[in-house]
Structure formats: C-alpha cells, structure tokens
Image (tube, grey):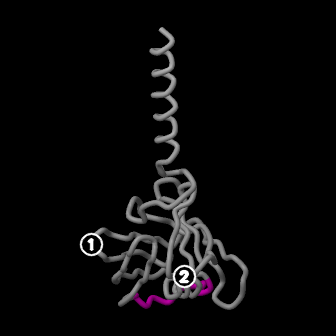
Amino acid sequence: MKTKLLMTLLLISQLLFISSCSSQKGQSGKGNITESAWGLVSVKAATSDSLLMPLKEEVPTLNVLTDGTIKGTTGCNSFEGQVAVTGYNLKFGNLLFTHVSCPDRAIENAFYASLDSTDNYTVDHGHLLLKKGDKVLAKFMPLDMR
C-alpha cells in the first residue's frame, strides 16, 4: 500500500514538474512569433525614449508567416517583406511600404525604426516584444485579444 502511494506521489510530482517546464501561450518566456497576427500596443519613439501608443482605429499590425515573409500595416500604410528567424534572433529585410499620406506620422516613423532595428524577440505573457539586445522597441498583443 505504501509503495503504491509513494509511486503515485512520485508520478504526480514528475507530471507537475514537466508541465511547469513547458512554455505555453500567455506564460512568461520565449514563444512562437508565428502563433498570431499581432497588433501594436506601444512603440519606442524614433527620436526619444518615450513610448507612443496608437489610436484604437489606427493600430499597426504585424504578421510573421512561417514561409519567411512578413505582412502588416503601420496603421495607415501597408507593408510586406522578408524576415529571417533563427531561434529568437530576428531580422526584417526587403520591406516594401505603400506611401499614402498619413495624418500622424510619429507612430508610423517609430514603427519603421523599430522594424529596422530589431534583432531579437520574446513572447512574454502573450505579448510579442521586438527588441534590440535587451531593449524593448515595440510591444504587441494578438489582434484577436485587442
């Protein structure tokens, strides 16, 4: 009887340990950038360290596809291009943007600058963080959660 109880407790503790080691969407840690279409929450201003937040009706979007392409909008203009993802290192390239005149260019310029400077990413508590080194340049959340 004691042996069965001990084995059961051991099995339960192993299962709890294994499940705590896995990184799931919504938990802290690295995650898959292609899991969602992402909507911008905030972006570091192009000319200062202040954070800019888009208007709800003009949210920049980002969609990283598994075939190495990227598509999205700046809230006003659309873009597409290439993305190289190696582990959690990230480099955007060959980005082509439409050039519609936009009323507020500050967020668009900051968004361009963040894509140009990004070298890695993290998915933390369901948020996508585009980063240069340890510095967060832009924060996104899944579009279906906005």
Q: Tag 2 or tag 1, which sits nearer the N-term?
A: 1
Residue wearing tag 1? 67
Q: State the image coordinates of residue 127 (x, y, percent, origin top left).
A: 55, 61
Crowd rating for badge 2 (residues with CA inside 10 Å; few <14, some 14–19, many 20+)? many
For the residue pair 46 and 104, the one nearer the viewer reads as 46
* Residue 10: numbered disc: none
Q: State the image coordinates of residue 115 (x, y, percent, origin top left).
A: 49, 83
* Residue 111: numbered disc: 2
Which residue is pictured at 34% across the width and 82% down the height?
82
Amino acid type at image mark 1: Asp
Q: Residue furthest front?
A: 3
Quadrant that contains the C terminus: bottom right
Which residue is pictured at 53% across the width and 56% down the height?
126
Q: Is residue 42 left or right of residue 79?
A: right
Q: Identify the magenta region.
A: 97-106
For the residue pair 42 and 133, the one nearer the viewer reads as 133
Q: State the image coordinates of residue 136 (x, y, percent, origin top left).
A: 62, 75
Front of the two marks 1 and 2: 1
Crowd rating for badge 1 (residues with CA inside 10 Å; few <14, some 14–19, many 20+)? few
